[in-house]
Amino acid sequence: MQTLHALETPALILDADRMQRNIARLREHLRPLGVSLRAHLKTAKSIEVARAMMDSKHGSATVSTLKEADEFAAAGVRDMLYAVSITPNKLAHVSRLRQQGVDLTVVLDSVEAAQALSDYCIASGEKISVLIEIDSDGHRSGVRPGDALIVEIAKALQHCELRGVMTHAGASYGSFTDEAKVAMAEQERAAAVSSAQMLRGAGFAAPVVSVGSTPTALYAKSLAGVTEVRAGVYVFFDLVMAGLNVCAVEDVAISVLATVIGHQREKGWIMVDAGWMAMSRDRGTASQPVDQGYGLVCDAQGRVIPDLIMSGANQEHGILSIRAGSSAALPDLPVGSLVRILPNHACATAAQHDAYVVVNAQSDITAHWPRFRGW
Amino acid sequence: MQTLHALETPALILDADRMQRNIARLREHLRPLGVSLRAHLKTAKSIEVARAMMDSKHGSATVSTLKEADEFAAAGVRDMLYAVSITPNKLAHVSRLRQQGVDLTVVLDSVEAAQALSDYCIASGEKISVLIEIDSDGHRSGVRPGDALIVEIAKALQHCELRGVMTHAGASYGSFTDEAKVAMAEQERAAAVSSAQMLRGAGFAAPVVSVGSTPTALYAKSLAGVTEVRAGVYVFFDLVMAGLNVCAVEDVAISVLATVIGHQREKGWIMVDAGWMAMSRDRGTASQPVDQGYGLVCDAQGRVIPDLIMSGANQEHGILSIRAGSSAALPDLPVGSLVRILPNHACATAAQHDAYVVVNAQSDITAHWPRFRGW
């Protein structure tokens, strides 16, 4: 079997055993809560990973781009939610996907967008299905729960198929304690359920109540009234999630394989051939208690090297050094040594690569899975 | 002719007139200095842009990955410098490129790497050409000028073709005044020239003295002793370069086209369908006097909207708001409006896209140029 030494670097490595454990963990958490999982495939962007995440090859799934919808449709996924507010210039693309037999739901959060969609449905003779986005935590898009605008939007959707509401508690990425995550999950649930009830009170059926973020999905105690949960980053986890105590560092399933290219010994620097192009510029741990730089460094077998981080990054050069304040020794890593660097943010790092090199727990290569990207 | 309204968003827009002006500016600056330009193609990663930058379709060129070398070799480029220290796992790839007729030079900065390359040359029967990397400013890789190690490395390269030295003054990205940029250019020149002279003094020919970064290339007063200049980002420029006064904001040739998807009016937020996936996570202006967030917003014709920046970014959502401290009014941009967002860092933003939509000064679409990426 091929080993990592057969690869050119940098390369994106996926530990399939860790991934399967991460997938099983969320499934087991959600089962007693009585909701279905609509896996968010924006982290993976891979047919093989998607199939491991979904209950069926037909879905259900969440996507962040219509390019994802195209790729997953070609692989047989038939039930998808496109979870970014729809724009007029994407409606012809939505129609093409629906004509292929994809039950594609869109989202929006304004009367203007609802009227534009309704007008499009009149013109095209379609009844496009839609969820109203609810703002459960003030971090991004959506209508605040309790706002009469929710019903105004529903009224403007008369030529569409209004299915209900969706929300995403992205503020859960600031929830460091278990109690905060549990509370954020309840806030997300309550915002979505109360909004659906407001619609029902106004005479709209609103059968779908969709919530989700990886921290809230894993920490929700009750999902009463919720019909589906969306989460994506849980499939790989990352240092941001480990910093939130949502997972252990040892659960992080992807890493970037790099080779030592030199040293600046008087500065305590080890140079590698992976920079921000391979890691992304994501510095999501910079605002956490432990700043991991551009990533935490492991040996070629995936074992963490204590306090060795990528402290600086140029396009194709990374600078590894011991974390400020640590007394750990700089390891002896001669030119040509392989290291594996855990990412701050799985979605951002994976997006820099066109394939996963899949390994088992012994770091033997078992497969190459393509990724896609773009819009 | 197609207009930007025909596109799905987000999309990467290239103003070809601005690009041609940027290319002409560096050519005109370098001509009286008597050096050749070895254009760095890591920013562009496009055959069409590369041809506009190079003096001939055969080169010369600089690349940051062997994937770039493969793509440009297939397009006829025959003279390339791969400007990241070479690793053993890439040597077979280097040989394949050389067997295709590419004069590919590699770089390194240690005796270990030199011995490994020399051993490889003995085994393969090749004489691979190589430059020794000099550290002209302490920012990354390379041997300090004056260090006897330079000659030790040269001695270890006996089975290779040692061509000379190269350096990159990346610290020029911290040079805000014209005087500082002129001084950094001279520091870069002197480091490279003195290192080449050290090699010549020890009996090595060292015909090549290669320097370059966009700020030093444009501000060098003398390049005496230098044989070639490398620069890349000058082809498009970006907000980091504008913040350094290397260019004007109106010179920035690429932007990300996005559509307004909603508003959070009480917060002064305009939401668009371009987030960090379309812009990259690069926050290169955060350490400059004017922080541009994730980018500076223009209207669909490319005219700057005063003080409107992308202040927040999720994967596919951007938050536009007025810069803190500004009294500028939030513009009226209804759902469906198009905007163009100038990037902090051209290399990072362009890397998130698979094509350039090329426009003229009237914002009419004149071409689509593919990009590539990966390693």
Image (cartoon, coloured by chain):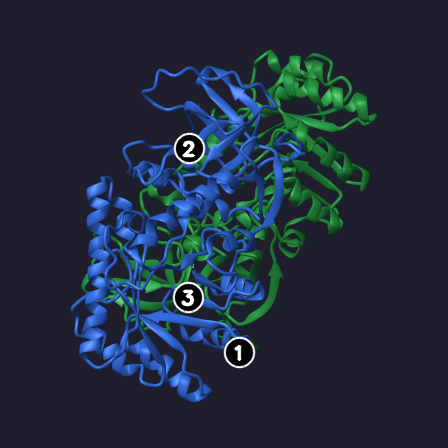
Chain colours: A blue, B green
Label drawn at residue A99: 1
Please provide percent x and percent y for residue B102.
Answer: 77, 40
Vertical placement of A141 versus B185: above or below? below
Label drawn at residue A250: 2
Q: Is residue B354 left or right of residue A234?
A: right
**Secondary structure of residue under mark 3:** strand
> Tags 2 and 3 in contact by the CB under 8 Å rule?
no
Q: Is residue A176 left or right of residue A239?
A: left
Residue hosting label 3: A82
The structure residue drawn at horizontal position 44% and vertical position 18%, both measured from the top left corner, is: A267
Question: Mark 2 belongs to which amino acid?
Answer: Glu
Pick the front one: B9 or B129: B9
Vertical placement of A317 versus B372: above or below? above
Tell me how far mark 2 sits from mark 3, CA to CA: 32 Å
Of label 3 and label 1, which has the lower sequence position?
Answer: 3
**Of all residues shown, which one is farthest toward the front?**
A32
Q: Quadrant of residue B87?
A: top right
Work out whether residue A161 can be spotted. yes
Tell me how far mark 3 sits from mark 1, CA to CA: 16 Å
